[in-house]
Every structure is written in C-alpha cells, then in structure tokens.
C-alpha cells in the first residue's frame, strides 16, 4: 500500500493531539493528588478534631444513651449538604456561641476549642451554601 504525504501528516497530527491531551490529563492528576495530600479530608478533620470535642462536651447528654430535649448530636456527621443536619449544626452553633450549651453547671469549652468548633461549623455551612449555589 502506498502512503501519501497527506495521510501521513494527518496521522502524525492525531498522534500529537492525543498525546497532548494525555499529557494534560496527567498534569491534572498530579495537581489534584498534591492538593489532597496537603489538605486534610473533611472526614479526617471531623473525626480527629470535631468529634472528640463534641464527645467531651455534648454527647453525654445528646448521644446514643441520652437525648436531652430529644436532641441527638453524635449522628450529625460532617456532611453539610444534608439540609437537616446542616440546620441542626447551625442551631447547635448558636447555643454554643451564646454559652447556652453545654449548660453552665457542666464542663465548658476552652476559648480555643470553642473557636475551632465555631469556625468549622461556619466554614462548613458556607461551603455547603456555595456548592449548592454553584450547582
Ligand atoms: C448536662 C447535659 C447537657 C449537655 C452536656 C449538653 N446539653 Fe444540650 N440540652 C440539655 C437539656 C436539659 C436541654 C433542654 C432544655 C434546655 O433547652 O435547656 C438541651 C437542649 C439542647 C438543644 C435544643 C434546644 C431547643 O431549643 O430545643 C440543643 C440543640 C442542644 N441542647 C445542644 C447542645 C450542644 C451543642 C451541647 C454541647 C456543646 C450540649 N447541648 C450539651 C442538656 C445538655
């Protein structure tokens, strides 16, 4: 079979194009991996930082065993795209911020703990809102 210049040219063009698409894909992959490595996942942050605080100050009244005022907080988790859960977090944050919860007779958050928790709730609510608006 005879190959003419034209078909050879278009073949090499196809090879080049698909290679650059491939290379771009590789680059993207690397970038997203890098980002993930530097940032803690929402799940890890929740499990390592938030849950222990809630466990110490809230779950013994609003957990598996006791649900004062019918409120259970240990099942809320970190998924703020769940509207019911996001609403409960928002409500809880108001009570924490105004020092209504935990009750004043019980162990209180340190200033740093409170700041960490409040920042996390605020940030999570904002992110969920932004995500919803973008979708
Ligand atoms: C010593 C037990 C105890 C602890 C600890 C405690 N709560 Fe409560 N919580 C209660 C009781 C009792 C009520 C219902 C009466 C009231 O509102 O004061 C309540 C009510 C609530 C309500 C519902 C309020 C309403 O208007 O219906 C929320 C939300 C809440 N708590 C969140 C929290 C959070 C968040 C924490 C941890 C920072 C926490 N609680 C720690 C005993 C507790």
Image (cartoon, grey):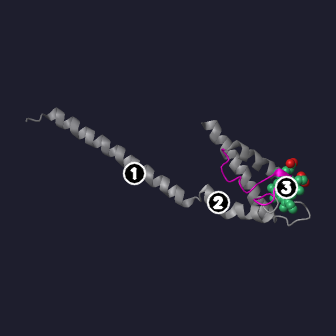
**Residue 46 on image: x %, y %:** 66, 59
Q: Quadrant of ligand 1?
A: bottom right
Q: Which residue is mark 3?
A: 68
Q: CA distance from mark 2 to mark 3?
A: 27 Å
Q: Which residue is mark 1?
A: 26
Q: In the current view of this chain or complex, which residue is farthest to the left?
A: 1
Mark number, residue 45:
2
**In the image, the residue with mark 3 has its CB under 8 Å from the nearest atom of ligand 1:** yes
Q: Residues within 10 Å of mark 1 (few under 14, many from 20)?
A: few
Mark earlier in primary sequence (2, 3): 2
The front one of 106 and 10 is 106
Q: Secondary structure at mark 1?
A: helix
Residue 47 figure quarter:
bottom right
Q: Secondary structure at mark 2?
A: helix
**Residue 5 on image: x %, y %:** 14, 35
Mark 3–mark 1 contact, CB under 8 Å?
no
Residue 133 figure quarter:
top right
The front one of 37 and 80 is 80
**Residue 30 on image: x %, y %:** 44, 55
User: From the viewer's perspective, is the residue at label 3 or at label 1 nearer?
Assistant: 3
Which range is magenta?
62-81
């Amino acid at each position: 079979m005879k190959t003419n210049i034209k078909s050879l040219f278009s073949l090499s063009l196809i090879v080049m194009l698909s290679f650059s698409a491939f290379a771009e894909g590789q680059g993207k992959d690397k970038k997203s991996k890098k980002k993930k490595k530097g940032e803690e996942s929402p799940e890890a942050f929740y499990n390592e930082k938030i849950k222990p605080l809630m466990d110490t100050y809230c779950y013994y009244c609003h957990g598996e065993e006791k649900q004062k005022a019918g409120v259970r907080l240990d099942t809320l988790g970190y998924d703020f795209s769940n509207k019911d859960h996001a609403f409960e977090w928002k409500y809880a944050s108001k009570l924490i911020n105004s020092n209504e919860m935990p009750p004043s007779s019980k162990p209180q958050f340190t200033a740093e703990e409170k700041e960490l928790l409040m920042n996390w709730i605020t940030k999570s609510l904002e992110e969920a809102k932004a995500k919803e608006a973008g979708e």
